[in-house]
Amino acid sequence: MARLSDLVNVELNIDYIKIQNEQIPISFGMDAMEFIADVYGEDYSVFERDLNDEFVGKEAIVATRKNMKIIRALIYGMVRSGGTECTPEELQRSIPFSQVTNIYQICLDVFMSQNFEDEDLKKSVQPQDFQKKNQNKKGKNRKR
């Protein structure tokens, strides 16, 4: 039987952050959503909506209670999905506050690259809108 690692690049979805000069693997795998939801205290879809509302398209991160909750959840979910066993409290205590923004940015870059395909972004901010527009155009052409 073939091994998956012989067929595909199993490291494709892995990046690294540095905590106390140690490389820690991060990943946005399927299990990351579960870890994020556990820490965030809400369904993953609520986390993603809040993340988009608070951060996407903004130049600077403002340290608010809600933003820090989003940042903690994303970092924790990706560290756990990357294969490192820890509690949210252990992770939080291990990261110097001065490094939080840099670590978050690395996690966000991995998150964004996994969530959006370039073709989808070209079509519409919300791919389902693109599909509805195409269906409406087809219907209009038939009437003429």
Image (cartoon, helix red, strand yellow):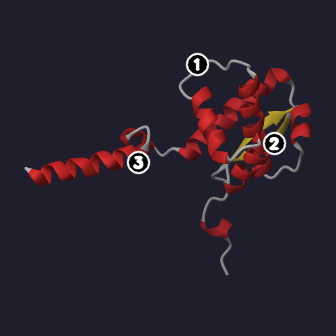
Quadrant where the N terminus lies?
A: bottom right
SS at mark 3 in the image: helix
Q: Which residue type does callout 1 highlight?
A: Glu
Q: CA distance from mark 1 to mark 3?
A: 27 Å
Q: Which residue is mark 3?
A: 128
SS at mark 2 in the image: strand
Query: Which of marks 3 and 1 precedes in the sequence?
Result: 1
Answer above or below: position of 30 versus 74.
below
In the current view of this chain or complex, which residue is farthest to the bottom?
Answer: 1
Q: Which residue is mark 1?
A: 59
Asked which quadrant contains residue 101, the reply is top right
Q: Crowding near pointer 1: few (<14 within 10 Å), some, many (20+)?
A: few
Q: CA distance from mark 2 to mark 3?
A: 36 Å
* Residue 24, label in figure: 2
Which sits in the foreground, 113 or 67? 67
Answer above or below: position of 95 versus 124.
above
Residue 104 at x, y = what percent? 72, 31
Residue 73 at x, y = what percent? 76, 39
Q: CA distance from mark 2 to mark 1?
A: 26 Å
